[in-house]
Image (cartoon, rainbow, N blue to C red):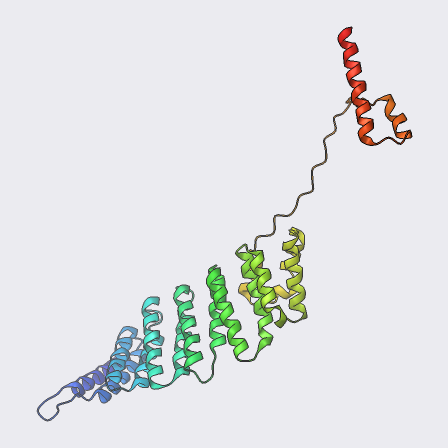
Amino acid sequence: MSKILEAQEHCKAAEKYLKTGLLKWKPDYDSAADEFSQAAQCYRIARDVKNSKECHMKAAELYEKNRSFFHAAKAIENAVIVSKELSSPEELYNMACNSSSLYQQHGSGDAGANVLDKVAKIIEEKAPELAVKLFQQAADVSSVESSQHQGTEYISKSSRLLVKLERYDEALDSLRREIGFHLESGYAGAVGRLTVAIVLVQLARGDAVAAEKAYKEWGNNCEVPEMQTLEMLLQAYDEEDRDAAKRALASPFIRSMDVEYARLAGTIPLPEGIDPAPKAAVREHAAPSYVSANIGDGEEAGMSRAEIEEIEYADNRKTEEEDDLC
């Protein structure tokens, strides 16, 4: 028997379990769901993705009616895996949320966070905005429901994706939350590198003052390489030194960070720089300025500059009056 025919037999058996009669007042949801699950597996082997997905979703609906929340969640998760190439990102997003909710109702927070993370990776390229939401929800579930508390890992993915999308304000919120997770778990060692990331994001926003404030707030968690990099970078922006800022952003430490932050460093606008004051223009073959013959005598006599200028002015006036008389 082909797998398609086998799947059809399982679907017929499922429908029988759902029928009621004089001697059967209540549908057998659990048995029907099992039959739909087996049909879904047969369709999957036969590479009939559409029918496989539909059978998984029917099974999930029946398991939920029977309050078998874990099996319902697992069925939706299987539907996602089968139809990830067929379903739209929006549909996969909704399926992930439903599956996670059912896992949580069963008390399996780890599985609930994991399915959100799994679907976020699937839709990340086509719908990064939805993927960000799933990573953030996974962090929420992990921090509240999960026993493993992997919220830091999920929120880190959200931070990096927001930076990639150039949604810097949201990235800052995500990075601050990531720091909070690390401090809560007592792992302050990772905060230094995140401080560098926040400074880079603030500079990308064009706010060097906020970047310096971030360093003052979390800089005490930085290690020596992180402190040296940040101090060199912030000093360059404070002094508006383009060359120094460029060297700091190209430092080996920043280039060794996660790809998103290393790339961000290459797009940060450099300070404008302070141009040197222009030199006074000098006219060629210009006549020398008039200097009174009395100035030299006045300097030898120890006269002040103001007194010498008065003598020069008087001499100029005398010369002009003589010219007028002529």
* Foreground pick, 268 / 25: 268
In the rendered view of the protein, which quadrant contains the C terminus?
top right
Please state, as top left, top right, bottom left or bottom right, where the N terminus lies in the image: bottom left
Which of 242 and 296 lies nearest the eye of the viewer? 296
* Callout count: 0
Image location (x, y in percent) of residue 303: 86, 30
Query: Quick check: 127 above or below 98?
Result: above
Comparing 83 with 243, the one in front is: 243
Task: Tell me: 122 left or right of 79.
Answer: right
**Outermost residue toward the bottom in this view:** 23
User: Residue at image x 25%, y 82%?
Assistant: 7
Horizontal relation, residue 18 to residue 201: left or right: left
Spot the residue most to the left.
Answer: 22
Report the residue at 43% width, 71% height from top.
136
Residue 202 on image: x %, y %: 54, 59
Q: Which residue is at a point 39% across and 77% down the rendered structure image?
A: 115
Q: Is residue 50 left or right of residue 299?
A: left
Residue 262 visible, this angle: no
Q: Is residue 232 visible?
A: yes
User: In x, y percent, where is residue 23?
Assistant: 10, 93
Q: Considering only vertical position in the picture, is 176 above or below 317?
A: below
Task: Name the residue nearer the viewer: 259 or 97.
Answer: 97
Quarter location, residue 73: bottom left
Q: Is residue 133 left or right of residue 16?
A: right
Residue 299 appears in which quarter of the rendering? Answer: top right
In the current view of this chain or complex, which residue is farthest to the top? 326
Please state the horizontal and vertical placement of residue 280, each as a whole percent of the image.
72, 33
Image quadrant assignment for residue 266: bottom right
